[in-house]
Image (spheres, helix red, strand yellow):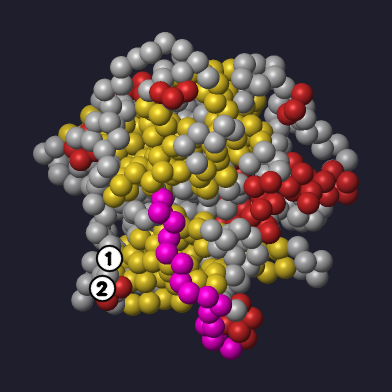
Amino acid sequence: MVITRRKFLQRSSLLATTLATGKTTLLNAMAHSVPTMPVALDVSTLAQFVDSLPIPEIARQQGSRLSPSDPKLSVPFFRIQARPVASKVHRDLEPTKFWSFGSSVPGPTFETRSGESLLVEWVNALPNEHFLPVDHTIHGAEADKPAVRTVVHLHGAKTGPESDGYPEDWMVPGKSSLYYYPNQQEAAMLWYHDHAIGINRLNVYAGLFGTFFIRDGVEEALNLPKGKYELPLILCDRLLTRAGQLLYPVSPDPVSPWVPEIFGNAILVNGKLFPYLEVEPRRYRFRLLNASNARFYHLSFVNEAPFHQIGTDQGLLPAPVPLTDLEIGPGERADLIVDFAEHRGAQLVLKNDAFVVMQFRVSPKKVTDTSSLPPALRPVPKIPESQAVQTRLLTLDEYVNKAGNPVMLLLNASHWKMPVTEKPVLGSTEIWTLINPTNDSHPIHLHLVRFQILDRQPYVPWLYQTKRQLQFLGPPQAPDPNEAGWKDTVRADSHMVTRIIVPFLGFTGRYVWHCHILEHEDNEMMRPYEVIPAP
Ligand SMILES: [Cu+2]
């Protein structure tokens, strides 16, 4: 795995990272433009492992409605409100003001089965003013637009375009949208989050996200740990003030407060800082989601305890992959099995490089574990490259000002509003070749579809930028073993060409693809694409 300097810095420290990159960050903001900006919390002063890990509540069905696809059927109906909440992230901090789809952050978890559709009325019950710094120079967030807008995207879902949360389909406070999720897809951990154009980074940072599980018989037949032995671990980092409130950094330019990335001083797991979880000495299944705006995590146990990854963004891997550490980028998910049987009576600390994330307290009492970790999980037939009818070469572009600070990012040098150029045919398979000349690793997400990673290959960026010549500096590298399943978000590493193979199935219509570093996405590393009917 290639680790770029920027990525190393992202991983290596918390607040210090934003200082070390020399970009427009909190330090600049504090030094130059906002003398009254609150002081960031020194998290090392807080006691660790004093709060137990919260588990988000399960979303509660509110009756049934007629199915939009078959009016003879009625389907479960949910009504979920985005609204302000206050939630304690640590015993010794005042409640933090968030926006959430539930009573705390993350919002409620949906539990559903493959092929069982449902309806959600997403309600905007937020106030009319934003509590985080909106940048009106950013496309879609101009001063004539309402400050508070939201639209919900279910990340990883095969959903019709009218229910996919197109970034311009936002609603203002007091309005709602009825979305239909057919769930015609394999078991996986999806997640819902805000996707409003130009302010998505602020709305997700405020807390507008939650998870959505699809189950199926293949998964159930494996006898994996379930019930209280299967838990979500939702990671997000936040910059907290001494008063325990959210701080979103701003640039030194008061007209354009956008910053290219943010890194918090606090890593929250299911909304808590340094939580602990009491576990039995047996197997657990942890469904990990990186819901952070920009942070890549590099996770391991302090005692280097081994574990297995059994699934990725879009469901089960062909076979468990043994690991002692795991990298997970923004938007990605990892399905993990940790067996605590060998650790009776021990306390295992999960860390992100040098930084403590959470603690597992293993009971000394012997238990019988009836779950299994089968050697084979679900076949993932490799899509042959010959199946692709089209190959698209797409660049990931960063633009800097005279001081070398990023001011905008684009996909294929194209703004959001430019005509749609990617128009795959429904039912066809394409190869998307992501050419990354920047110093960042960008997690690229395509809506609607699942795909497989073909390879990554180092290349000479300047030759491609000046002469459109792809000269490679080494052989193509196969995806990591824990990426060799169905994905919906792929790490496009710095100075690498990353190729994915994508069957476009399910629906025709307008969707988006974008970088899942939300600061990039908002400014404008996002493009529409359109699935067109077969001729
Ligand atoms: Cu990016």
Tell me where residue 162 appears, x and y as whole percent: 34, 52
Is residue 144 depicted above or below 173 in this figure? below
Q: What residue is shown with label 1? A: 383
- In the rendered image, which quarter is residue 235 located in? top right
140 on left or right of 246: left
Please tell me which residue is depicted at 34% across the width and 36% down the height of the picture. Answer: 213
Dot 2: what SS? Answer: helix
Q: Main secondary structure of the magenta part?
A: loop
Tell me where residue 487 appears, x and y as whole percent: 38, 54
For this rendering, which residue is in front, 27 or 195? 27
Q: Which residues are magenta?
A: 467-483
Is residue 341 depicted above or below 510 in this figure? above
Is residue 382 depicted above or below 33 in this figure? below
456 on left or right of 113: right
Between marks 2 and 1, how big is the CA–CA gap? Answer: 7 Å
230 on left or right of 130: left
- Residue 151 circle label: none
- Residue 387 circle label: 2
For this rendering, which residue is in front, 169 or 257? 257
Residue 133 seen in the figure: no
Task: Inspect the magenta stretch and tell me whether residue 445 lies in it.
Answer: no
Tell me where residue 277 appears, x and y as whole percent: 50, 20
Tell me where residue 81 appears, x and y as whole percent: 45, 31
- Which image quadrant: the C terminus? bottom left
For this rendering, which residue is in front, 416 or 210? 210
Please tell me which residue is depicted at 61% across the width and 77% down the height of the picture. Answer: 461
Please tell me which residue is depicted at 29% across the width and 38% down the height of the picture. Answer: 214
Check disc 2: other Cα within 10 Å, few if <14, some if 14-19, many if 20+.
some
- In the rendered image, which quarter is residue 16 located in? top right
The kind of residue on which mark 2 rests is Gln
